[in-house]
Image (cartoon, helix red, strand yellow):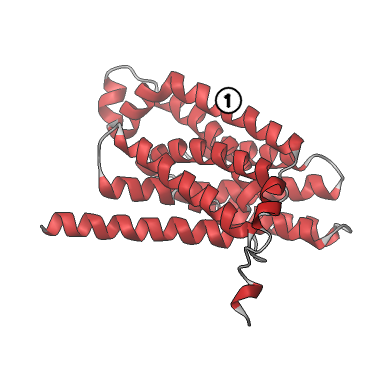
Amino acid sequence: MDFSDIINFSDYDQLIPLVLNSLWAGALLALIGGLVGVFVMHRELSFAVHGISELSFAGAAVFLLFSLDVVFGAVFGSLLAAAIIAFLGDKARDRNSIVAVLMPFGLGLGILALALYPGRAANKFGLLTGQIVAVDDPKLGAMVVIALVVLLTLAVIWRPLTFASLDQEVARARGVNDRLLGIVFMMLLGLAVAGAVQIVGALLVLALLVTPAAAALRLTSSQLWVPVLSVTFALVSMVGGTLLALGGTLPISPYVTTISFLIYLAARLVAKVRNGA
């Protein structure tokens, strides 16, 4: 296989206008994903992210089958999964069991809906691995709404949520309603996952909602710099992956996940060198 079949930047300047919506949507997703990811790591919800993404995929696939709005389908599936996990999975062991049940159910339901869908194969594949030119104006508008809801809510609950995430027992003793905060955050996580599914696909959501925050936590424990680095890493992965995918024939997700993984490896290396010094 010729390398130019995978990466070819000969018409790059003409292709950039085709993905402006994807770049804006990716930047918004990186912002909310980087911030939400910090609490995903603090509250040990990495496994839950994958479970929510599977039901988000199922919702999007079912809505696609019935010619309904795919974005609303993804949001519906994500919020349903988030609500189930939030209300039934108060304890970590219960939560992991629920996620383990939701994942195969969501994936199986989504695959069934795609198998029955008579439309273009690209639509089916895109729900799993993302599509670089799939972000039209309505989807960008939906991404803006999702981002605003997530950011405004995080701004209101950031301090008590940080307190409860880092020291749950002390926070409860001081009157912080960790149960309510946990439910609200799960809803925000559901919205973030629904947005991510539209861009990077259901199978690789972790690359934006977990890996950047995990890399940031390898470098610092500062309550200021962890979210700043997490958002920066997510932004580099998302925008960089989109620009690389523009000159290639592969879906966007391999580029995004590779950049995200390399950043994580670099963060681990820096942390190891620093700690060994």
Q: Quadrant of the N terminus?
A: bottom right
The secondary element bearing badge 1 is classed as helix
Q: Residue furthest left?
A: 277
Residue 112 visible in the shown view: no
Please state the horizontal and vertical placement of residue 61, each as a whole percent of the image.
Answer: 76, 50
**Type of amino acid under label 1:** Val
Q: Residue at x 51, y 58 (%)?
A: 257
Please state the horizontal and vertical placement of residue 106, each as a whole percent of the image.
Answer: 66, 52
Q: Residue furthest bottom?
A: 1
**Mark 1 — residue?**
149
Please state the horizontal and vertical placement of residue 99, each as a whole percent of the image.
Answer: 53, 50
- Left or right of residue 257, residue 225 in this image: left
Q: Is residue 241 above or below residue 48?
A: below
Q: Residue at x 70, y 53 (%)?
A: 15
Q: Quadrant of the C terminus?
A: bottom left
Q: Is residue 3 above or below residue 45?
A: below
Q: Residue furthest right?
A: 118
Residue 259 visible in the shown view: yes
Q: Tell me if mark 1 has few (under 14), some (14-19) or many (20+) residues whose alpha carbon lies within 10 angstroms of its own.
A: some
- Left or right of residue 37, residue 114 in this image: right
Q: Residue at x 38, y 56 (%)?
A: 263
Please state the horizontal and vertical placement of residue 259, each as a whole percent of the image.
Answer: 46, 58
167, 210: nearer the viewer: 210
Q: For residue 275, which quarter of the picture?
A: bottom left
How many marks do you count on the picture?
1
116, 236: nearer the viewer: 236
Q: Residue at x 25, y 35 (%)?
A: 222
